[in-house]
Image (cartoon, helix red, strand yellow):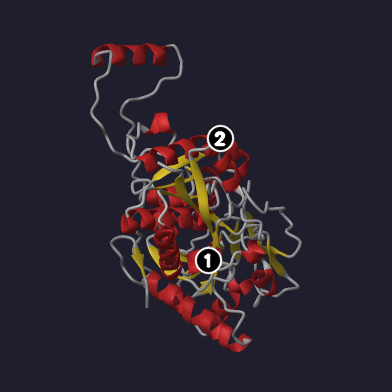
Amino acid sequence: MGKIKVVHYINQFFAQIGGEEKADFPAQLRKGEVVGPGLALTQAFGDEAEITATIVCGDSYFNENIESATKQILDWVKEEAPDVFIAGPAFNAGRYGVACGTVADAVQSELNIPSVTSMYVENPGADMFKDKVYIVSTKNSAAGMRGAIKALAPLALKLAKGEKIGASCEEGYIPQNIRVNFFEKERGSRRAVDMLLKKLAGKPFTTEYPMPVFDRVAPNPAVKDLSKATIALVTSGGIVPKGNPDHIESSNASHFGEYDITGVMDLTAETYETAHGGYDPTYANQDADRVLPVDVLRDMEKEGVIGKLHHLYYATVGNGTAVASAKAFAEEIGRRLVADHVDAVILTST
Amino acid sequence: MVKEIERAGIPVVHMCTVTPISMTVGANRIIPAIAIPHPLGNPALTPADEKKLRRRLVEKALKALTTEVDGQTIFKD
């Protein structure tokens, strides 16, 4: 058997085309090229495998054209006919993670070519695709590249060779909620007592049956009469008064801002901007109404369509921000909105 | 964030471009938006047309808030 053929998918950032200003870069096939993290993969493969083509696509382009971009990429992969397809690693980049999961799933289910991707467990792409393709677990930033490649390369080779894939904890992928029967060395009662002793001694132990997390909140009843309702705006798109007075971080935000828009009829380039570092800020900086629609809500308030626009709005930056932080911000925002008798919320995300 | 505000007891409509992410995070009322860097605008339009576009989207969002839903719902039109 010759070398295993690999096709690798990466985004515009890891292809060193550019950051957010290039996120609309359309899908591109680079035959015979090894780009960015592909170099580290190649090194890890040794003589066993080679990347025969790299597909590069901007994150915004992919997510705004999911169907056509996926189809284009499938056509290319089909033509290249690799033994395995690798996407990423995407770490905690949300749109990149969704792109990696989407293409890896499509290649595997439609072309029957084994696929694997890699990202941080809180990446939205992980929840969406963990039961469809193997997703190697990474740290939340590209600083974890080395560890990611160390698990990704061997798993890709195993998949290409059709070898048996071990449990998630052995191979380093995100658990897929699949249970496999096997014989343990120790019987159950013994393992349970061992676990209990560790727990009593305050030592770390691993449960054999983690409880699934079903965290869904039922929808609240609809607003009965808009013309009497107070509507509040909340955004994860980072819209802040010019100068970002609360210094909300451009990524992994540690706090949110509360801003008074009493008397503000329109957000302008002189008065508002975005603090968000995860999308091209040009358009939001020109006119922040494109993210936080204050202008039209003021019109609708004047026309009596809504009762009123709440005089405070809340903003943070949803860019690589930990789920635990976002949850804590929104709990506090929710408390304040309830205290202010707000009837409904429009939350915008970029 | 959508989920925690909903949990506080206030109906929320989520306006975003990548609706699969909105589904994953547990939003109940979802309005697909225009594009990631300008969800409620389109710089290719004239300012007047752009504002009309934004008005239509916000009207859809308000309509979603006045609509009873029994689970996660993407309001296409």
Q: In this view, does A150 lie to the left or right of A287?
A: left
Look at 30% across and 15% down and name the residue there.
A191
Q: Nearer the viewer, residue A93 or B77?
A: A93
| Alpha carbon separation for disc pair 2 and 1 | 27 Å
Location of residue A74 by image quarter? bottom left
Q: Which of A12 and A20 is in front in this view?
A: A12
Give coordinates of residue A188: x percent, y percent: 24, 16
Residue tagged 2: A147
> What SS does tag 1 mark?
loop
Amino acid residing under circle 2: Gly
Query: Does residue B10 appear anywhere in the picture?
Result: no
How many numbered badges does the structure rendering display?
A: 2
Residue tagged 1: A27
The disc at residue A124 is: none
Q: Nearer the viewer, residue A248 or A283?
A: A283
Asked if disc 2 and disc 1 are in contact, CB closer than 8 Å, the reply is no
Q: Which of B12 and A157 is in front in this view?
A: A157
Quadrant of the rendering where the N terminus of chain A is positioned: top left
Residue at the extreme front: A1
Query: Does residue B58 appear anywhere in the picture?
Result: yes
The mark closer to the camera, 2 or 1, is: 1
Q: Is residue A292 left or right of residue A285?
A: left
Q: Which chain carries label 2?
A: A
Look at 40% across and 30% down and name the residue there.
A169
